[in-house]
């Protein structure tokens, strides 16, 4: 059962997220109406959005491995769901042209879903095939934009690293782009879901994001993609264990 402090902290942080998102959404809508493109909105507003949320929620971050980020090379970034704050950290600190593959139902999320659509995030329909995913990713990579995916699918409730799905690695191999693992871990991970089933209420301490060395696909055959997946997962797991 959540403590009163956790509940209050959750309500505060959800208020911050909603407030910052609402302000940025209003500014974005004004500029979009004036003819600005989604790419302009992504480049100029995402930093203020994620930074405002992290500061307003009192999240301390430690970021390492940014020398592995090459803005000139489209890559498939694969991150674990190690924190409620992983998306905001990646948005704030990994400064390159990227879009995320997210669940299609999140398009209906208040404010955030609309802004995700406006900034060109990739909504993956339910029961989409690997071919569908590859077809979605290919033109994004072709224009020089990287993609972020969370191969665990959903955030594990026990705080442990979950199994990885193959889709991100199949797409990277098919599109001939490097896979860049990203490890996110909290100093004090939540031991159970907090209020409303999420972890916004606990004190994570410092949240650490580490960009790890890229991995190059060697082939699209099953064994090669499996090895690519396992290498990426082991790289993230080894980084988590050092914290």
Image: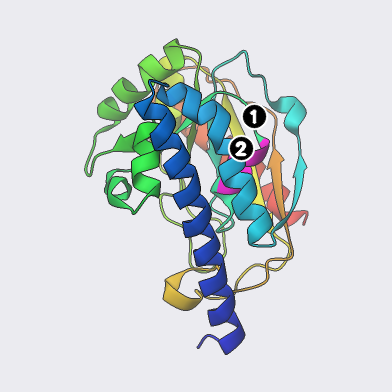
Q: Residue at x 78, y 54 (%)?
A: 242
What's the distance in space between the residues labelled 1 and 2, CA to CA? 9 Å
The span shown in magenta is: 88-93
Q: Residues within 10 Å of mark 2 (few under 14, many from 20)?
A: some
Q: Quadrant of the C terminus?
A: bottom right
Q: Tell which tag, 1 or 2, sits nearer the viewer.
A: 2
Question: Residue 11 in the image: x percent, y percent?
Answer: 51, 73
Q: Residue at x 32, y 24 (%)?
A: 136
Q: Quadrant of residue 25?
A: top left
Q: 171 and 201: which one is in front?
A: 201
User: In the rendered structure, does residue 169 fall within the stretch colored magenta?
Assistant: no
User: Relative to residue 233, is residue 206 depicted above or below?
Assistant: below
User: In the rendered structure, does residue 89 fall within the stretch colored magenta?
Assistant: yes
Looking at the image, residue 205 sits to the left or right of residue 20; the answer is right
Q: 39 and 61: which one is in front?
A: 39
In primary-sequence order, the first of circles 1 and 2 is: 2
Residue 175 - label: none
Q: Is residue 220 visible?
A: no
Q: 168 and 2: which one is in front?
A: 2
Give the SS element for disc 2: helix
Residue carrying label 2: 47
Q: 16 and 146: which one is in front?
A: 16
Q: Quadrant of residue 114?
A: top left
| Name of the residue lying farthest toward the left | 127
Question: Residue 67 in the image: x percent, y percent?
Answer: 76, 26
Residue 95 - label: 1
Q: Residue at x 38, y 23 (%)?
A: 137
Question: Residue 86 in the image: x percent, y percent?
Answer: 58, 50
Q: Is residue 142 visible?
A: yes
Looking at the image, residue 125 sits to the left or right of residue 38; the answer is left
């Amino acid at each position: 059962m959540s403590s009163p402090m956790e509940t209050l902290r959750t309500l505060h942080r959800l208020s911050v997220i909603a407030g910052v998102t609402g302000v940025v959404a209003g500014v974005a809508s004004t500029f979009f109406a004036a003819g600005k493109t989604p790419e302009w909105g992504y480049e100029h507003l995402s930093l203020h959005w994620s930074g405002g949320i992290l500061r307003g929620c009192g999240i301390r971050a430690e970021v390492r491995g940014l020398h592995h980020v090459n803005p000139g090379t489209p890559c498939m970034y694969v991150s674990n769901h190690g924190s409620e704050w992983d998306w905001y950290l990646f948005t704030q600190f990994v400064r390159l042209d990227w879009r995320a593959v997210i669940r299609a139902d999140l398009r209906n999320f208040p404010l955030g879903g609309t802004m995700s659509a406006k900034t060109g995030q990739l909504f993956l329909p339910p029961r989409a095939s690997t071919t569908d995913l590859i077809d979605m990713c290919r033109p994004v990579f072709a224009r020089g934009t990287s993609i972020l995916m969370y191969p665990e699918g959903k955030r594990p409730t026990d705080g442990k690293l979950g199994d990885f799905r193959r889709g991100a690695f199949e797409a990277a191999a098919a599109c001939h782009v490097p896979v860049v693992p990203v490890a996110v871990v909290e100093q004090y991970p939540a031991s159970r879901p907090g209020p409303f089933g999420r972890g916004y209420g606990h004190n994570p301490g410092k949240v650490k994001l580490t960009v790890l060395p890229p991995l190059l696909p060697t082939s699209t055959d099953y064994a090669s993609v499996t090895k690519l997946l396992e290498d990426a997962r082991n790289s993230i797991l080894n980084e988590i264990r050092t914290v």
